[in-house]
Image (cartoon, helix red, strand yellow):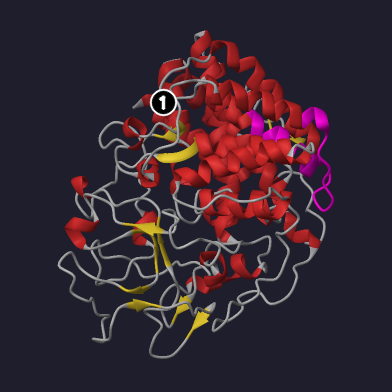
Amino acid sequence: MKYTKFLTIILASLFTFSCTKLDEELRDSLNAEASTVNAAGLLQNAYESMNTPLQDQSRVWASAEHTTDEALGPTRGPDWDDNGVWRVLHAHTWNADHAFLRDTYRELLGVQFAATTVLGRNPTAAQAAEAKFIRALSTFYVLDAWDQVPYRTDLSDLTKLPITLKGTVAADTIIRELNEALPNLTEGTPIRANKDAARALLMKVYLNRGVYAKRDAPTFAAADMDQVIALADQIINNTKYSLNANFYTNFAANNTAASKEMIYALENTVGVRGGNNRFFWFCGLHYNQKPSGWNGFCTLADFYDKFEAADTRRGAAFTGVTNVTGLRVGFLEGQQFDQNGVALKDRKGNNLSFTRKVALQETGNDLEITGIRVIKYPPDFAQGIEGNAENELVIFRLADVMLMKAEALLRKGNAAGALTIMNQIRAARGASALATATLTNLLEERGREMYWEGWRRNDLIRFGKFLDPLVAAPGTTSTRPTKSGVERLLFAIPNQQLAVNPNLTQNPGYN
């Protein structure tokens, strides 16, 4: 399709060489292509441009989860080494040449560019609003992780370097963009930009605005917290939302249709639109499980131990999965079984029993079974084990909005209001009621509710816990024994970008 060809050419030029020079012949070709591209086609491309950065296990998700206590990708003998690219994320020893972080930065800027092209093709008011939401979302991810956002709204002269937005200036730009978009967004479907998606993203920005002003010592202005509460109420008071009786309905193959919590998700419909987020189960499952996995990622026992046994978020059977293969959803610890109750074996014939013990570099005879595995998205067997999964990728949902409101209330001194919300969620998940609301147990509750959804790094930084060492649970090995340096609150600006864009400077501590 012409618009896909057009965007492919120009994005390759922009984000490999950062727009410093475009050959005149190439410019003439691009202008000729652009004249045949309409806003609807470009908007479709903008949605599609989010697939890789948001749905690949090595991009935004890895930067948000592998850097925390929720996920790690240990080297298992010869498997999963990848030149240490996973280990350094968890150990907080990445540098400005980290391949995954470099590609994530570039691809998020590609999303921003794809959205901006829509605005230059005479879009309808609704199309422009959707494009502005997509641009704001990509800008948010770059701000949150790198602070410096190359940003342009005028594509008429691509030889001009984009300006660089930083800190609260970048945050306020996102806020302005979303407020401009809101009146022309629809209530609509969760697989397209909609009013409540814009409100949820605004909540994220206001909640973290103090972080973006000073990452190592954030403050939380009452006016920002008031905005979080007011926006949350607009979403919560919409009667179409409610907490699901089954937690995992939020992540199943029919989640946008079946879940009452869904606010915004990336569509995955085979032959229509989307990427493929099946990595959520393939990355952790053993080769001898169904579906057969890659036997890689896991979580820490310390994090697993934050859950009560009765909390369904820790693990449960799921119809259409457990009765078919024996696989449970949630966290997998201990002996694994097939659908007939027969104990599974590893490739050496030993019991397939996932252990609490895990190290960044596994050696020995048990490296196939170390680490508690995580299956938050029930596998989509309807598309076939090797097919593209139709589980929509969750970006915003009701429980997150509720917990953000609880946090804003707590930061304003309303612990009782925060506790009510936290216990409402816990009751829906089968967990016992908490007696008090504190910043400590609110962060833990966000972990229990939002694990592996790509928010842990953001949360830990806001609560001042991201740099803390990861202390080993009894019988396990510490995976990050010492406190990280303050520079780790941001990722390094990729050297590739610094080489071609003089408007960028390296973040402190990486020179």
Q: Is residue 215 magenta?
A: yes
Picture quarter with the N terminus? top left
Instruction: Say left or right for 270 vs 76.
Output: left
Residue 507: percent from the left, percent from the top?
78, 53
Image quadrant occupied by the C terminus: bottom right
Left or right of residue 491: residue 57: left
Q: Would you say residue 30 is visible in this rendering?
A: yes
Instruction: Inspect the image, locate mark 1, and give the three-letter code of the amino acid beneath it.
Output: Gln
Quadrant housing residue 419? top right
Q: Secondary structure at mark 1?
A: helix
Q: Position of residue 495 (x, y in %)?
A: 69, 56
Q: Residue at x 23, y 50 (%)?
A: 319
Q: Which residue is mark 1?
A: 44
Query: In terms of depth relative to the viewer, which is nearer, 274 or 119?
Result: 274
Residue 304 image point, x, y percent: 51, 65
Nearer the observer, 340 or 148? 340
Q: Assess disc 1: are there few (<14), some (14-19) or many (≥20) residues with their C-alpha within 10 Å of its C-alpha.
A: some
Say if 146 sits above or below 268 in the image.
Answer: below
| Residue 121 in picture, x, y percent from top left | 51, 14
Q: Which residues are magenta?
A: 202-224
Q: Residue at x 61, y 47 (%)?
A: 105
- 75, above or below 390, in the image: below
Residue at position x 78%, y 53% in the image: 506
The residue drawn where x is 79% and y is 36% is: 412
Residue located farthest toward the bottom when viewing the structure as drawn: 364
Asked whether, in this view, residue 403 is left or right of residue 467, the answer is left
State yes or no: residue 176 in magenta.
no
How many labels were placed on the picture? 1
From the image, give the main secondary structure of the stretch colored magenta. Answer: helix
Q: Is residue 413 left or right of residue 369?
A: right
Residue 174 in view of the camera: no
Residue farthest to the left, as pictured: 340
